[in-house]
Image (tube, rainbow, N blue to C red):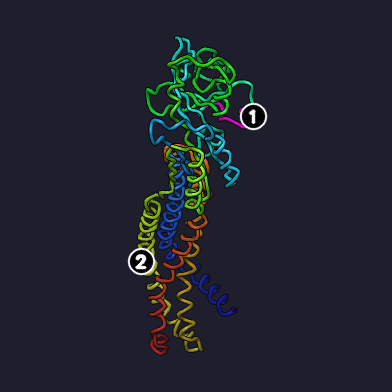
Amino acid sequence: MTGIVGAIVEAWDELRIHKLRVLLALIGVACAVTAITSVTAVIAMLKQATQEQNDKQSGRQVTLMVSAYPMDQSAATPTTWDDAFTNLLDRYSITYASRDEWIQAPVRLPDGKRSVQVRTVDVDLGTIDRIVPAEGRWFAEVDESAYAPTLVVNKAFLTALGLPDLSTHPTVEVGDQAPVTASIIGVLNDDWPGADPAVMVLYDQYHRWIGDDGSGIRSGGAAPAAGTAAANMAMQVPTVYLWVPADQVHALKRQIAQDMQAATPGWQVDVQGNNHGDGGLGRATTYAGIGIGGLALLLGGLGLVNIALVTVRYRIREIGIRRSFGATSGRVFFGVLLESVVATFVAGLVGVTLAVAIIKNIPVDTLFGGGIQDMPPFPVSAAVIGMLCATAVGALAGVIPASVAVRVKVIDAIRY
């Protein structure tokens, strides 16, 4: 152990003596390490941004989508679908789940009553699909027991109300024969330019306060008139989204299909998952980034080899004297090799420090089209890769000069 420490100290002293020459070579190494570390960290953020974008479109990994379709026109609409949904959550300890149903319902706007697309969901859909309102808030558990429905609308709906924002705490009447006053608590960005007004409301709140047909008549009221939305509701059930552990997907898909099929006689239950991966894009970008940075690091290492060879040539007499006093070939080889390793290790530390400063002070996440919700910390793997690459290049760069130093004959070195 003492010999290793002594060799490292000796290598550091030699670097201090030839610091100007070594510094010129290490600038390239430090820049290359900065590039490798920064690219690795940016790729991790890119993967997170891509994953979050996929989550917004198809749910978190892994989300199961359970849907049902009538196998013939004579199939009766299931009446136990919601009960079966609740039983699933208890039976399989599913934490995040949501029903999802698309309905047309009449809404009273300033220009008159209009049929608007209403999407009924559960609170957990905000977590599953990473829904973040542009203004206001998403549904909370307290909204489920409120004495009036709450709505999350798109900007087109707010524009149709003639309002610029939610500062006036707007309300709107939903329903036909017995409209219900609902409060708007959040606003989402439009899915595309020129989007139609759309509304989201809690599934239980909609069916409790507005009714299955959108009339506003709840259970116990008069029957809806013929030709209302009730006819359109007759042959559909809400889609169910379940966020489940990735290692249990295959078993749960089979069990959930069986359970929901038992609750929907005459209907075909389909269970699909979104665990399709990224097609190797993440690995490809990682390898490409490391490859580009590695090439730059090798070019910096070549400069270090040249500097080390020149330094060894100037130290031939010194090496001969050390050999004459008993220094072994291994000690000479190890000492010269460590000079390059210690130098690139220090350059690696500088490069990693610069990479951390760059990533922390530049809003890289906004470069991917928007903020990242779950910003990953600076990956330790990126710093480790940078340091390993720097050390490896130092070792490779030191092999040739160390071999030249060992091959020097003592008598010739002293006479040099």
> Considering only vertical position in the picture, is 206 above or below 336?
above
Secondary structure type for disc 2: helix
Mark nearest the camera among 2 and 1 is 1
Q: How many marks?
A: 2
Range drawn in magenta:
135-144
Task: Name which residue type carries label 2.
Answer: Leu
- Mark 1 crowdedness (10 Å alpha carbons): few <14, some 14-19, many ≥20: few
Residue 302 bears which disc, if any?
2
**Residue 180: % across, % down:** 56, 16
Instruction: Depth check: give the residue in front, 130 or 222.
Output: 222
Instruction: Depth check: give the residue in front, 52 or 128.
Output: 128
Is 149 magenta? The answer is no
Task: Name which residue type carries label 1.
Answer: Val
Residue 301 bears which disc, if any?
none
> Considering only vertical position in the picture, is 35 above or below 19?
above
Question: In the rendered image, which quarter contains the N terminus?
Answer: bottom right
Is 138 magenta? The answer is yes
Q: Which residue is mark 1?
A: 142
- The residue lying at 44 percent from left, 41 percent from top is 269
- State which tag comes first along the sequence, 2 or 1: 1
Question: In the rendered image, which quarter contains the C terminus?
Answer: bottom left
- The residue lying at 52 percent from left, 70 percent from top is 12
**Residue 281: % across, % down:** 37, 51
- The residue lying at 47 percent from left, 49 percent from top is 254
- Mark 2 crowdedness (10 Å alpha carbons): few <14, some 14-19, many ≥20: some
- The residue lying at 51 percent from left, 54 percent from top is 247
